[in-house]
Image (cartoon, rainbow, N blue to C red):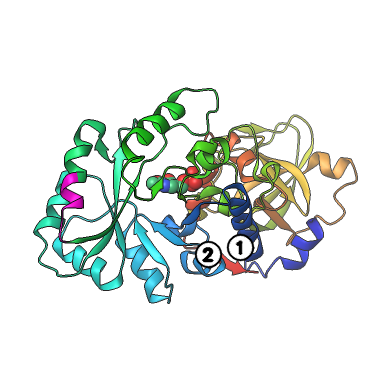
């Protein structure tokens, strides 16, 4: 695995690179298919496909039945790139001008509020749209409340602007198998949806993996397509997934320290004995989390070593002392690739050390990071 990463490590040009494995995306899509064989797949590619590149990801996921985005701009980028599948606007739209664009490009808006419903009803366009009615079954974020639902559904199903109507909800706690929240949400949803005779959608990645009842006509995976696990105690590979993004950066300096020397801003790490550290060219301006603590694992030329001190804007420091002492440091020299997460180091593990979730790590990759598709 490490060798394959080395042979694929691009010229790093002094900075980090996100290597996106398109075969991994396709593999993960098959895992979704096998997990929910009777469901259509709405592949969630919002937020630049969780940092992986929206157009490249959508092309790799060409077997998806539809794509899900948060913003109109993301939907337009997909159409501009020639993506022909249905594109669902998961937050919907509010203005008549946006509805014009929706109609022009055949997008499918979610309708989650009476404001959106009214915009649709008063829109002067003469196209009929496919819309997804979102019901709030307990997350209290978006969607018609269950006591408002009957009225919303009546208006939507009677609207001359609506061609096809589907129903969806979103789970608040699907990654928590111990809780009653998810069964409660699912049964509340089923009570509303089952007699309507329309297609339904419930499960995100955690929902479709952990809750078979959530595998209805449509599933809406995001994170698992990118090879990461939504569950705190597991990483993507434990679920048969392959990380699609490997973030690498070059080692740009190796330094010897004396016992007592301090490293980085605030001198928060002090050498307990004579030490050797490496400096890698990646920092919070690239999207590496500033809150990553001393001890966060990084992989230097395939060997795991701890990050030390504070993360800077463009650099991190790594304690190489143990690797050098144990004689494992053969390939470690300036220019060696440092993996921050991905193929040899699950983002889930890094996220834990930075008090965050893998979603945030991959989404936060900044524009300065070079992208390489393999
Ligand atoms: C409405 C909706 N459906 C599906 C997803 C995909 O979720 P996940 O990435 O956890 O699979 C999201 C992501 O936040 C979402 O907002």
Residue indicated by mark 2: 57
Of pointers 2 and 1, the one earlier in the residue sequence: 1
Where, by quadrant of the figure, is residue 72 drawn? Answer: bottom left
Against 286, residue 114 (above or below) is: above
Q: Residue at x 30, y 69 (%)?
A: 106
Per the image, label 2 sits on a secondary structure element best described as helix
Category of crowding for the residue at label 1, using alpha-carbon neighbours closer than 10 angstroms: few (below 14), some (14–19), many (at least 20):
many
Q: Are marks 2 and 1 in contact (CB under 8 Å)?
A: yes
Q: Position of residue 142 (x, y in %)?
A: 29, 40
Does the magenta segment cover residue 159? yes
In the shown orientation, is residue 43 left or right of residue 128?
Answer: right
Does the magenta segment cover residue 244? no
Q: Is residue 364 visible?
A: no
Category of crowding for the residue at label 2, using alpha-carbon neighbours closer than 10 angstroms: few (below 14), some (14–19), many (at least 20):
many
Q: Position of residue 173 (x, y in %)?
A: 46, 31
Residue indicated by mark 1: 20
Per the image, label 1 sits on a secondary structure element best described as strand
Distance from Cα at disc 2 to Cα at disc 1: 9 Å
Against 3, residue 218 (above or below) is: above
What range is drawn magenta here? Answer: 154-160
């Amino acid at each position: 695995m490490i060798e394959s990463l080395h042979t694929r490590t691009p010229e790093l040009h002094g900075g980090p690179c996100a290597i996106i494995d398109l075969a991994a995306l396709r593999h993960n899509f098959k895992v979704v298919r096998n997990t929910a064989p009777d469901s259509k797949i709405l592949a969630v590619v919002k937020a630049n496909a969780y940092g992986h590149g929206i157009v490249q990801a959508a092309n790799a996921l060409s077997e998806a039945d539809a794509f899900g985005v948060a913003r109109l701009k993301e939907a337009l980028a997909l159409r501009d790139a020639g993506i022909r599948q249905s594109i669902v606007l998961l937050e919907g739209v509010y203005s008549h001008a946006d509805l014009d664009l929706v109609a022009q490009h055949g997008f499918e808006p979610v309708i989650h509020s009476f404001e959106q419903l009214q915009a649709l009803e008063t829109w002067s366009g003469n196209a009929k749209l496919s819309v997804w009615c979102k019901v709030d079954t307990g997350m209290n974020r978006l969607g018609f409340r269950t006591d408002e639902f009957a009225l919303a559904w009546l208006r939507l199903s009677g609207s001359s602007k609506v061609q096809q109507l589907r129903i969806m909800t979103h789970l608040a706690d699907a990654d928590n198998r111990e809780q009653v929240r998810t069964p409660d949400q699912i049964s509340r949803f089923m009570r509303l949806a089952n007699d309507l005779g329309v297609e339904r959608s419930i499960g995100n990645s955690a929902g479709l993996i952990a809750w078979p009842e959530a595998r209805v006509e449509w599933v809406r995976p995001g994170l698992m397509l990118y090879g990461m696990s939504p569950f705190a105690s597991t990483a993507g590979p434990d679920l048969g997934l392959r990380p699609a993004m490997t973030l690498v950066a070059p080692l740009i300096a190796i330094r010897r320290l004396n016992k007592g020397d301090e490293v980085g801003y605030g001198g928060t790490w002090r050498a307990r004995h004579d030490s050797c550290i490496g400096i890698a060219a990646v920092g919070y301006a690239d999207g590496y989390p500033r809150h990553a603590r001393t001890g966060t694992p990084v992989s230097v030329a395939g060997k795991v070593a701890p990050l030390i001190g504070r993360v800077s804007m463009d650099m991190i420091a790594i304690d190489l002392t143990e690797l050098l002492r144990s004689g494992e440091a053969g390939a470690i020299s300036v220019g060696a690739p440092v993996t921050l997460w991905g193929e040899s180091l699950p983002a889930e593990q890094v996220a834990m050390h930075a008090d965050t979730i893998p979603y945030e790590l991959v989404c936060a990759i900044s524009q300065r990071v070079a992208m390489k598709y393999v």
